[in-house]
Image (spheres, grey):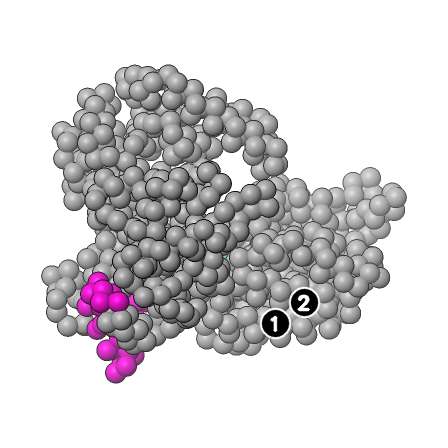
Amino acid sequence: MSNSSTDPVSVEIIDGVARLTMNHPPVNALSLRLRKALADALSAVAADPGITAVLLAGQPKAFSAGADISEFGAGAGSPPDLPTLVAMVEDFPVPVIAALTGVALGGGLELAMAAAARIAAPDARLGLPEISLGLLPGAGGTGRLPRLVGPERAVEMILGGQQISADQGLRDGLLDAVLADPTSEEGLLWATGFAQGDGDPSQPSVGVASHGEGTIEPLHRRPPTRQREDKIAAARANPGSIATLAAARLAKAKDPFAARAAIDAITAGVELSFEEGARVEREKFEERRASAESGAQRHLFAAERAARKPKNLDPRAAKHVARAGVVGAGTMGGGIAMALAAAGIPVTIVEAEQQALDRGLARVRENLTRSVEHGSRSESDAQNQLALIGTSLDYAAFADADLVIEAAFEDLQVKRDIFATLDRHVRPDAVLASNTSYLDIDQIAAGTAHPGRVLGLHFFSPANVMPLVEVVRGAKTDAQTLATGFALARLIGKTPVVVGVCHGFVGNRMLEVRSQQAERLLLEGALPGQVDKVLTDFGFRMGPFAMGDMAGLDIGWRNRKAQGVKAPVSDALCEAGRFGQKTGAGYYAYDGRGRRDDAAVAELIAGISASLGVPRRDISAEEILERLTFPMINEGARILAEGIADRSGDIDVIWVKGYNWPAYRGGPMWYADQVGLPRVAARLRHYAEQTEDESLRPAGLLARGADDDGASTAGGLIFGAAGQGSGQEALGGPAAANGPAA
Ligand code: CAA
């Protein structure tokens, strides 16, 4: 067996142990190339009578991240498929020991679960994350995991999709030992001891397992994973128990189709037999793999990774942020400070008045206490976080800050004044960011002596929880400032997406279009409950009116008054003191039992329709959905053509991460491709005529995409079947913005 440094699997024989090392960058995804190499290596080793054990290893960063996601679009995997490899490992003539380093995820963990034993490095991470791709484990994972860790933990891991630590894996029974370096000398010795079954019983982590009550047996005598039934016996004797265990997770599942499929497979594997479970698992896996819902989530996986590499951003230009500052101790300022402190960055909040600081800090304390109570953070973590948050009434406290984020009142003049003050107090190389959600970053920057160091960092509320940050590139933002803001957002665990300057950037600009249509639908005959239901049926957690009531209607009302804009229904509700949940009434009525439709609101809306002379009619769910989503797509097309977003996939990431667009619908631009651009454009034309609203006419990019879609294969690519489509590219760059689609 000869090895070269480019072989995806290398084989070394050391004292009778064959060490097979997978080396298929970047993450040992089990692509056809790696599967073939692994099958060949296993076959060669099986034929060697001198070999007593196999140590199956990967790279420090990844044992394996599982099946190759990019192969899923092409149909079932070419042979050898993953289940075949898994069977080879489980039925291997000598014990195979999986040595886990870095991540062992999805098919990677399934391969390891078929091994005779699993040893892992202390920092290894284990999981079955298929659910977040709209899938379920497809290579025996739904059957083997419950047999190793019991049905309860298996349901948690498969439906939750999160990674667990090596320590947790050891406690759960997924691992047999945690070793400093399982792939080298120590792992080889462990494998030898395991194969010989002569491990020292006083050291149960070396080659032997302890089966409770002090019984210690050599590990190799236990049956293969698929035949182990001790941990599933109780669930098998109690049919329906898996469904009961999974009920709460199913109710909260982001992709209910994949969750239900996973529950069916686990149930069959536990309540019937491993083989029956494997049959159901395969069938459901193939069904989900081919589904629109999984396609949408795989698109998002790629789009999120593409968004990490914005055009014209050199990550090497980023400056390290050792200390940060926040202006404003309101809900946003406090949330941003918490997010920074949670990542270990000391942060000072500056406010104009002590009372505001006290209130802000009290809110931060309250949030931290609540997260300790919910178990999402330990008491000591909360204390450490709090200790990193300082406060001051003086901008001089920002003297040593590398970056300051302004999170003050949403008013251009207020912000310009703050930036002018900051400019005088911070170091000349400090980055200045505004958390504005609508305002013009260029006008804010213009009030400073160094507009190059200004950018927008638009967090979403609550900022300590919501993952999205729109990183707003101003006309003068320099390379270092942009790279630093972007890197900081990643460092604190957020999903940053670079956008350009316009009113509301990408997310709120599209939201505004949806809000206008929602209000308009009320005037034409719909009621809040009906509109909201269409969007919750589509997969949103909440519709626009329930969301408005939760956020408070008075904020938008005040903004509209300042801009001289009207929203007749929302304005009338506010004039009647109905500000939403906080006043017990808004679009809905609220009492102890929650939200309910309110006849008074129906009456009020009917009165406004009459006074404006808008005839009321029955509006179908289909029209409501199209009226809410298609204008958003249209606005997305304008955003792409203007170069405000780099790619259509960026818009999708923004809407999924910032506005809870259902991941299994892939984001608005992905959804447009699924509906078909010709249909979206035709319906927009129809609604423009029906409502006499010219803004609903298909934008140039959308209209051209629709024409192409009818005539050629190019249309879908404009919005990015692969998530990477950019209006600019489709049009041949900004200079050609009025030219024909390339
Ligand atoms: N298949 C193909 N490519 C993958 C991959 C996979 N399973 N996992 C990661 N990659 C690629 C990424 O696309 C990225 O590529 P680019 O550099 O071209 O952008 C590269 O590997 C590095 O990935 P990240 O940027 O995400 O790196 P990270 O260090 O932040 O995270 C990771 C690494 C934790 C492995 C993360 O990539 C991840 O969670 N991957 C997905 C894991 C997963 O879902 N596995 C299940 C697959 S489905 C399956 O296995 C089904 C089955 O049962 C048969």
Is residue 296 visible in the rendered structure shown here? yes
- Would residue 185 appear left or right of 462 to someone viewing this image? right
Q: Secondary structure at mark 2?
A: helix
Does the stretch in magenta take in 635? no
Q: Which residue occupies 54% across, 61% down?
A: 255
Q: Which residue occupies 38% across, 46% down?
A: 573
Residue neighbourhood size for the residue with mark 1, other residues' Cα within 10 Å, grouped as few (<14), some (14–19), many (≥20): many
Q: Residue furthest bottom?
A: 711
Q: Quadrant of the N terminus?
A: bottom right
Residue 18 place in picture, x, y as percent: 64, 59
Q: Secondary structure at mark 1?
A: helix
Question: Quarter-wise, where is residue 696 in the image?
Answer: bottom left
- Would residue 27 appear left or right of 306 to someone viewing this image? right
Most common SS among magenta residues: helix
Q: Which residue occupies 19% across, 57% down?
A: 642
Residue where numbered disc 2 is placed: 264
Magenta range is 691-720
Residue where numbered disc 1 is placed: 284
Q: Quadrant of the C terminus?
A: bottom left
Residue 690 or residue 113, whichever sits in front: 690
Determine whether label 1 and label 2 are within 8 Å by CB: yes
Asked if 322 appears above or below 644 in the picture, the reply is above
Total residue callouts: 2
Residue 288 or residue 64, whichever sits in front: 288
Disc 1 residue type (three-letter): Lys
Q: Which residue occupies 49% across, 41% down?
A: 584
Disc 2 residue type (three-letter): Asp
